[in-house]
Image (tube, rainbow, N blue to C red):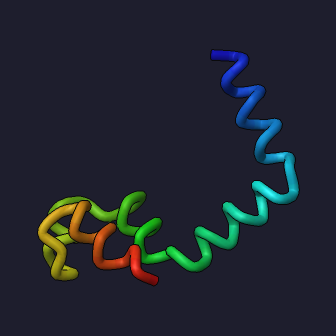
Amino acid sequence: MNDLLKSINLSLNSPFILSFLISWIFWSWPMVVGLLWYNAKTLQLYGYPNYKALIIENADG
């Protein structure tokens, strides 16, 4: 487990990986917010029946 954390830390210290991750979060913010903070009831209020529908709807950009 410690090796995995070291590997993740090393990857995040890479400027290319970190900038890609930040830009992906910036462009895909509805999907990121939905996956991290929405529960099933909130998803339905926004018109998505489940998480899969949220991802498919927002994956096109």
| Residue 23 as seen in the image, left or right of residue 36 | right
The relative height of residue 29 versus residue 19 in the rendered view (above or below) is below
Quadrant of the rendering where the N terminus is positioned: top right
Residue 12 location, x and y as percent?
77, 47
Look at 31% across and 64% down and name the residue there.
Answer: 38
The relative height of residue 45 versus residue 19 in the rendered view (above or below) is below
Residue 56 quadrant: bottom left
Residue 13 location, x and y as percent?
85, 46
Residue 8 location, x and y as percent?
71, 36
The relative height of residue 50 versus residue 57 in the rendered view (above or below) is above
| Residue 40 as seen in the image, left or right of residue 8 | left
Residue 9 location, x and y as percent?
77, 37
Q: How many marks?
A: 0
| Residue 36 as seen in the image, left or right of residue 14 | left
Look at 40% across and 80% down and name the residue there.
Answer: 60
Residue 49 quadrant: bottom left
Along the line of sight, the residue nearer the viewer: 61 or 51: 61
Look at 61% across and 69% down and name the residue there.
Answer: 24
Along the line of sight, the residue nearer the viewer: 60 or 29: 60
Look at 82% across and 37% down and name the residue there.
Answer: 10
Residue 59 quadrant: bottom left
